[in-house]
Image (cartoon, grey):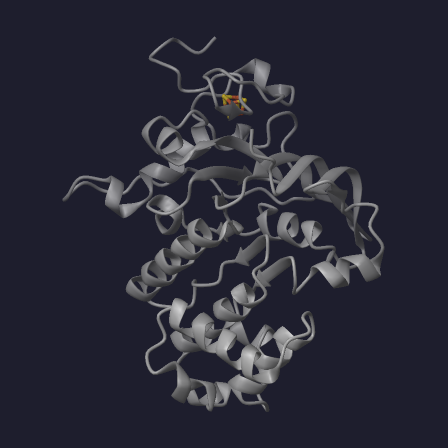
């Protein structure tokens, strides 16, 4: 059996604000294997980004991990020192941010940034580091990479800058990449291209990746597994095709109904009724209860995770298993 690159179990990351406790991540469990892409999907505020930041130890005050474990191979990241986490970030675990300028320094040429990124973690010559940078740019589909290396970030388009940021993430051959909505600002064709390149790189290099997105359509063709988050919890999880072909949780069913490609031409898109609840004021019991067409009196108590089908995990009393009546 392959050892997972990352195993998260029962993770709770809470924010202790003056207005109350926000349970941004509340009992989240998942794992990612080498070469696998996990799509972590949810609306903004569902806790998906905080899950990513928890893994790499970048949760800011007033937030903190209050429970659960995060294992990077055999290493417990929750109890790791700040110094160890810093060592891991940028070498073994890399992050790609929504804004590539979080990674890129505006006043340095791309070659300087990429070569320094390699030399910070490895003792090789500048010539070797430059050649590694060239390869990484070529791998993410940047044309004329030698020319691009001499550019400053402002001389590149938004799509190119994000490709460079992705190339930098892959530069030190990390075991794990966490990509937080990295293509949201780009047009759909470029998003698909970049995701496709990233997926190819993962399966070629064995790098595991968590692709965080609010858009189910973005990961639909490219992730290996999907975990759907709602109000700080993973509510539906499984292999990509299984989740798309047979969504179990009413929220996943709603999400799929609101994706344009999943609807027949001429049909109206179905919206999930109601609003996302405030994390400071979640409904009692199941947090999806006030928007859920299958809610029953039982849902006044919060559901635990169950496995109604092989390889599937769902947090719901009445998952879509057939046309049985909801009691
Ligand atoms: Fe809907 Fe109840 Fe399932 Fe929550 S537990 S999603 S309210 S059916």
Q: Is residue 319 above or below residue 210?
A: above
Q: Is residue 231 above or below residue 200?
A: above
**At 52% from the left edge and 84% from the top edge, which residue is drawn?**
110
Split into 4 quadrants, where in the image is the N terminus? Answer: top right
Please give the count of numbered marks on the rendered protein: 0
Judge whether residue 105 can be spotted in this image.
no
**At 45% from the left edge and 77% from the top edge, which residue is drawn?**
134
Q: Is residue 124 left or right of residue 324?
A: right
Q: Nearer the viewer, residue 108 or 11?
A: 108
Q: Is residue 239 above or below residue 52?
A: above
Image position, residue 323 (x, y; %): 33, 12
**At 62% from the left edge and 74% from the top edge, which residue is drawn?**
118
Name which quarter of the figure residue 264 lies in. top left
Judge whether residue 133 can be spotted in this image.
yes
Image position, residue 168 (x, y; %): 54, 70
Image position, residue 195 (x, y; %): 39, 57
Image position, residue 57 (x, y; %): 74, 55
Name which quarter of the figure residue 120 lies in. bottom right
Report the residue that reaches farthest toward the left.
266
């Amino acid at each position: 059996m392959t050892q997972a690159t990352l195993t998260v179990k029962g993770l709770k990351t809470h924010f202790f604000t003056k207005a109350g406790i926000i349970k941004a991540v509340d009992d989240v469990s998942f794992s990612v294997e080498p070469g696998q892409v996990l799509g972590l999907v949810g609306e903004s505020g569902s806790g998906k980004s905080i899950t990513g930041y928890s893994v790499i130890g970048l949760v800011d005050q007033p937030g903190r991990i209050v429970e659960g474990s995060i294992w990077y191979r055999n290493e417990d990241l929750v109890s790791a020192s700040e110094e160890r986490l810093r060592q891991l970030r940028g070498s073994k675990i890399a992050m790609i941010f929504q804004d590539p300028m979080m990674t890129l320094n505006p006043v340095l040429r791309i070659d300087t940034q990429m070569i320094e990124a390699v030399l910070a973690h490895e003792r090789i010559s500048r010539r070797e580091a430059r050649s590694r940078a060239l390869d990484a740019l070529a791998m993410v589909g940047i044309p004329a990479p030698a020319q691009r290396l001499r550019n400053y970030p402002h001389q590149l388009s938004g799509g190119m800058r994000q490709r460079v940021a992705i190339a930098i993430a892959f530069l030190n051959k990390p075991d794990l990449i966490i990509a937080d909505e990295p293509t949201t600002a780009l047009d759909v064709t470029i998003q698909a291209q970049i995701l496709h390149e990233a997926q190819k790189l993962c399966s070629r290099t064995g790098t595991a990746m968590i692709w965080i997105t609010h858009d189910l359509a973005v990961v639909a063709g490219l992730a290996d597994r999907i975990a759907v988050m709602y109000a700080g919890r993973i509510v539906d999880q499984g292999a990509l095709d299984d989740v798309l072909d047979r969504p179990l949780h009413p929220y996943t069913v709603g999400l799929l109904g609101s994706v344009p490609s999943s609807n027949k031409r001429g049909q109206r898109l179905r919206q999930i009724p109601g609003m996302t609840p405030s994390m400071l004021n979640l409904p009692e019991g199941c947090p999806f209860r006030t928007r859920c067409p299958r809610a029953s009196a039982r849902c006044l108590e919060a559901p635990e995770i169950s496995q109604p089908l092989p390889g599937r995990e769902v947090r719901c009393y009445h998952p879509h298993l057939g046309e049985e009546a909801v009691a």
